[in-house]
Image (cartoon, coloured by chain):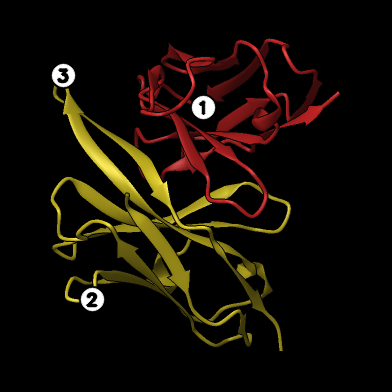
């Protein structure tokens, strides 16, 4: 199985901050990497697919980059509604696997 | 707007079978280009992919669950279902259903989970 390692596991940030979350795959996954936002009691929401493509309706402050084994999700200016847990997911091979999550909290 | 809704018992006894159904609205489960998936989240943990099914009935399971798992589809009801047998406390989790979009680019297949249900908590306890 491909292991997905996210860092940090949690972070505290203020509104307006630039936030970067990293995801590393245990082997190459080309660009088959998605990012999701998850709030308690809600359905997870797709933000980025294929490493860098912004899902329709997602604010442009979210961006993704990377290929191979190392990927990044960036929030350019953190907004109050962005406090949530973020997960990366590889779809290069089954079983599909997710990272452990990064919880973004209010500083 | 596509919507998915999980339903089923919230409490299952150890050794019994966990059964959940996902009802899809706002779109046909028979539409090509989509798989229909189950994912779970153990309390305080991350997300675990369980498996998915195509409307034709082709299935792909997580090997860690495959021996106990059945995912099926009922196109007439626009639903797909999960059955997990011989459950233990380790199967206690929030279970989500989701639509998986498949597309091809540069001869490569890409997948992403674009619509999810709200999730349903299933507790395994006597």
Which secondary structure lies at badge 3?
Answer: loop
Q: Is residue B82 above or below residue A4?
A: below
Q: Position of residue B4 (x, y in %)?
A: 39, 60
Counting other residues with Cα less than 10 Å from the Cα at mark 1, is it few (<14), some (14-19), or many (20 or more)?
Answer: few
Which secondary structure lies at badge 2?
Answer: loop
Q: Position of residue B29 (x, y in %)?
A: 21, 60
Which secondary structure lies at badge 1?
Answer: loop
Residue drawn at point x = 66 percent, y = 31 percent = A81
Could you tell me which chain the residue with mark 1 belongs to? Answer: A
Is residue B61 visible to the viewer in this orientation of the structure?
A: no
Q: CA distance from mark 1 to mark 3?
A: 24 Å
Q: Is residue B50 above or below residue A53?
A: below
Both labels 2 and 1 in a single chain: no
Quick one: which chain is yellow? Answer: B
Q: Which residue is mark 1?
A: A26
| Foreground tag (1 vs 3) | 3
Q: Which residue is mark 2?
A: B77
Q: Position of residue A97 (x, y in %)?
A: 48, 41
The image's mark for residue B106 is 3
Question: Which residue occupies the foreground of this view, A88 or A57?
Answer: A57
Residue drawn at point x = 51 percent, y = 27 percent = A26
Question: Which residue occupies the foreground of this view, B116 or B68?
Answer: B116
């Amino acid at each position: 199985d491909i292991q997905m390692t996210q860092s940090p596991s949690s972070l505290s940030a203020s509104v307006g901050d630039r936030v970067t979350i990293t995801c590393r795959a245990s082997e190459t996954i080309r660009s088959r990497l998605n990012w999701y936002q998850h709030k308690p009691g809600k359905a997870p929401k797709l933000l980025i697919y294929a490493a860098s493509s912004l899902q329709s309706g997602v604010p442009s402050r979210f961006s993704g980059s990377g290929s191979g084994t190392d990927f990044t999700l960036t929030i350019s200016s953190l907004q109050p509604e962005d406090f949530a847990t973020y997960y990366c997911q590889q779809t290069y091979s089954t079983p599909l696997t997710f990272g452990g999550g990064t919880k973004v909290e209010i500083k | 707007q596509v919507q998915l809704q999980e339903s089923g018992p919230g409490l299952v006894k150890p050794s019994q079978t966990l059964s959940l159904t996902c009802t899809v609205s706002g779109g046909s489960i028979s539409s090509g280009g989509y798989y229909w998936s189950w994912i779970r989240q153990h309390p305080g943990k991350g997300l675990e992919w369980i498996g998915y099914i195509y409307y034709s009935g082709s299935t792909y399971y997580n090997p860690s669950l495959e021996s106990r798992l059945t995912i099926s589809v009922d196109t007439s009801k626009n639903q797909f279902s999960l059955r997990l047998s011989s459950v233990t406390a380790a199967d206690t989790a929030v279970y989500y259903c989701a639509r998986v979009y498949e597309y091809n680019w540069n001869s490569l297949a890409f997948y992403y989970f674009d619509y999810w249900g709200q999730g349903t908590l299933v507790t395994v306890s006597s």
